[in-house]
Amino acid sequence: MLRAMRILTGLQPSGKLHVGNYFGAMEPAVRLQERGEAFYFIADYHAMTSMRDPAALRENTRELAVDFLACGLDPERAVFFRQSAVPEVNELAWILSTVCPMSLLAKCHSYKDKIAQGIAPNHALFAYPVLMAADILLYDSDQVPVGKDQKQHLEVTRDIAVKLNETFGEGTVILPEPIIRGDTAVVAGLDGRKMSKSYGNTLPIFGEEKPLRKLIMKIPTDSTPVEEPKPVENSTILALYKLFAGEADYQAMVEDHRRGGHGYGDFKKRLADAYWDFFAPMRRRRAEILADPGHVERVLAAGAARAREEAAKVLDRVRRAVGLA
Ligand code: TRP
């Protein structure tokens, strides 16, 4: 049967959206919704493995929904929902866990990293990749765009899918293809390292103008005097400016570095202006969304209904295959 290619990805609601999230996840997801039938969800069940504050989980989930819509997720094209609004995913996770070897989970880097950080090794943390496999397989996903850190989880998903099909028959679930984002998607943080919440070097997308501009003005720089040429290699200011400015403006700033006569304060000001202008349409859209208090819940409810329809079909097929129906 011919059907549209299904593209699925999940995002954890882990706090304020930053520029690294935008270029690494939001912008590619928005672009991909043109390419097939996109299923995008907020991974609130997964977030519970690191969050114990119900109010924060609720708030972060809602905020991510608002921000993703503001960034261009189009609910007319993409199916957008909360992971937990489709509880069927838990049943599939259970079924998958019956064919998932412990050793497959024990070797997962993200599990080992979290334990190394001193996080208590609870069952959900260990079983995290099984739930993720269920997220993907429940919707017969063809393509799954993720960051490099999720590559191993996608391999686990495929291993589990193969195992299920070997055990209960080919076609029980569909094998997904990962689309792994390359290094080019890594955005420089305010301290020059990779932008990441865990480094505390993020530039948020939304917020009050003054404190956001201040963050940019505080980017550390060397002490080259104003009149002298400035290094263009490893420049955090240039790396960020390239994301927001047009090619001509970017080249002009590179030239001004090489030539000298411009201070870092001037470069930062240009960067702050470009950043502020770049997100202006998203900021406007976000204000519109917030002005309609029921909008986000309506979008998520419609998305959940559509997702559940699809989940029911796949789960029915799997239940029959394993003998539950
Ligand atoms: N684990 C992913 C992350 O932290 C989020 C996620 C959960 C996901 N389920 C998924 C991503 C299914 C892709 C497909 O980024």
Image (cartoon, rainbow, N blue to C red):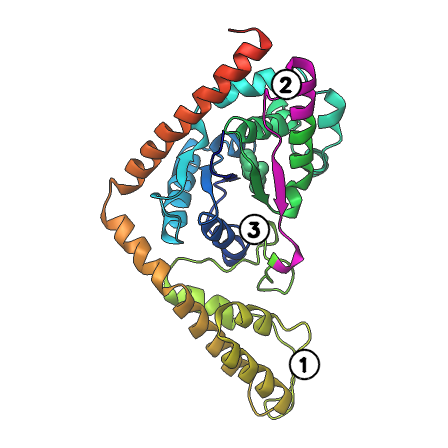
Quarter holding residue 298: top left
- In this picture, is 152 found above or below 210? above
In the foreground, 200 or 268? 268
Looking at marks 3 and 2 on the same chain, the residue that comes earlier in the sequence is marked by 2
In the foreground, 172 or 210? 172
- Residue on which disc 1 sits: 231
- In this picture, is 124 found above or below 178? above
- In this picture, is 241 found above or below 226? above
Q: Is residue 181 magenta?
A: yes
Please state the horizontal and vertical placement of residue 303, each as a whole percent of the image.
36, 34
Q: Is 247 situated left or right of 117 in this image?
A: left
Q: Is 62 situated left or right of 254 in this image?
A: left
- Residue on which disc 3 sits: 197
The amino acid sitting under disc 3 is Lys
Q: Which residues are magenta?
A: 160-184
The residue located at (49%, 33%) in the rendering is 2
- Residue on which disc 2 sits: 97
Q: How much space separates mark 3 and mark 2, taking CA atoms? A: 31 Å
Quarter holding residue 94: top right
Q: Nearer the viewer, mark 3 or mark 1?
A: 1
Residue 318 shows up from this direction: yes
Question: Are the two marked residues, 3 and 1, in contact with CB atoms closer than 8 angstroms?
Answer: no
Secondary structure under the numbered disc 2 in the rendered image: helix
Q: Is mark 3 within 8 Å of ligand 1?
A: no
Question: Are the two marked residues, 2 and 1, in contact with CB atoms closer than 8 angstroms?
Answer: no
Count residues near mark 3 (Cα–Cα under 10 Å), then give few for <14, some for 14-19, many for 20+.
Answer: some
Q: How much space separates mark 2 and mark 1, taking CA atoms? A: 53 Å
